[in-house]
Image (cartoon, helix red, strand yellow):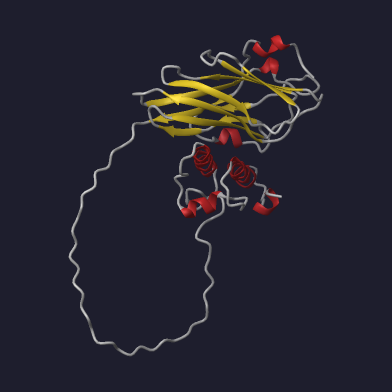
Amino acid sequence: MKKCLSCLLAALLTCRCIPSGAWTETAAAEDNTPLIAAAEISAEPGETVTVPLTVLHNPGIAALSLSITYDASMLTLLDAQSKAEWNTAVFLAGGDKTQSPYILNWDSEASADYSSDGLLAELQFAVAEGVTGEAVIGISVNQGSTFHADFTDAVFDTQNGLIRIAAATTTSTTETTTTTTTTTTAATETTTTETEPVSVQADYLRGDTDNSGNVDVADAQITLNAYTKVISGKPTGLTDQQFRAANVNLDDVLSVEDAQYILQYYARNTLSKKTTTWEQLIK
């Protein structure tokens, strides 16, 4: 099912856009608000990084068209790949990567809506040498080319991405010599009393990545940021405790799904006041 391909470059219509830098309460205010979001990541000058795009609360679409903008003085777009689990969708990218906006298109060949959430695409950028600051990855939905199987418009909120660029810091190391004095004392007899074993409580709250005592939008953002580091081949930056809290689906692998589940858990329990357990959410 296709509209005319000329629609893929249709004029951009008005769409709601959420500022970059964080998952926001606006995005999660409604449990079913469709959202397309880019991640916030950190990078160094001269580095190559990957920015994932994710879709949440997908209402079902037969075609999707996105415009991607960025600061060409700070970034060079190297590659754009579809990661959507839409088996029969045709993915078309906008050709000249130096052109802004750069267009990404998905078009159904099956006369049906795709409704799955998750990783949508990955954008690979080269960071220019000698630059520092914040580079915004702008996302806009091209409304004339984004529609359901019945050709009615599909509407999404969007969240811009952000690449924070900072030069690596150099840490100097000072060698210290320590003198240790050992004192030997006579052994004394001790008495050991056996006690009943004490149950050990988990040292983290599931989903509470920042250890604030609550599961909220910040936890989803931290988890998503850690995931972007994983796919870029970097350490997550999380402690063992934070990793266990972030890995809400308990598969021992940090993924975009963990961030999605945390956001959904927060939206249902805190915003919608619908008590939902992790077991009910992750089936």
Quarter of the figure that contains the N terminus: top right
Name the residue located 50 percent from the left edge and 48 percent from the top edge: 209
Residue 176 versus residue 147 in the image, above or below = below
Residue 234 versus residue 21 in the image, above or below = below
How many numbered markers are drawn? 0
Residue 71 versus residue 114 in the image, above or below = above
112 sits left or right of 19 in the view: right
Residue 84 location, x and y as percent?
Answer: 67, 31
7 sits left or right of 150 in the view: left
217 sits left or right of 168 in the view: right
Name the residue located 77 percent from the left edge and 17 percent from the top edge: 2
| Viewer-proximal residue among 190 and 149 | 190
| Viewer-proximal residue among 131 and 48 | 48
Residue 56, picture quadrant: top right
68 sits left or right of 281 in the view: left
Name the residue located 52 percent from the left edge and 68 percent from the top edge: 200
Name the residue located 66 percent from the left edge and 33 percent from the top edge: 33
Residue 61 location, x and y as percent?
Answer: 73, 26
Determine if residue 133 is in view.
yes
Determine if residue 19 is in view.
no
| Viewer-proximal residue among 203 and 232 | 232
| Viewer-proximal residue among 215 and 120 | 120
Residue 108 location, x and y as percent?
Answer: 76, 23
Residue 166, picture quadrant: top left
Residue 134 location, x and y as percent?
Answer: 41, 26
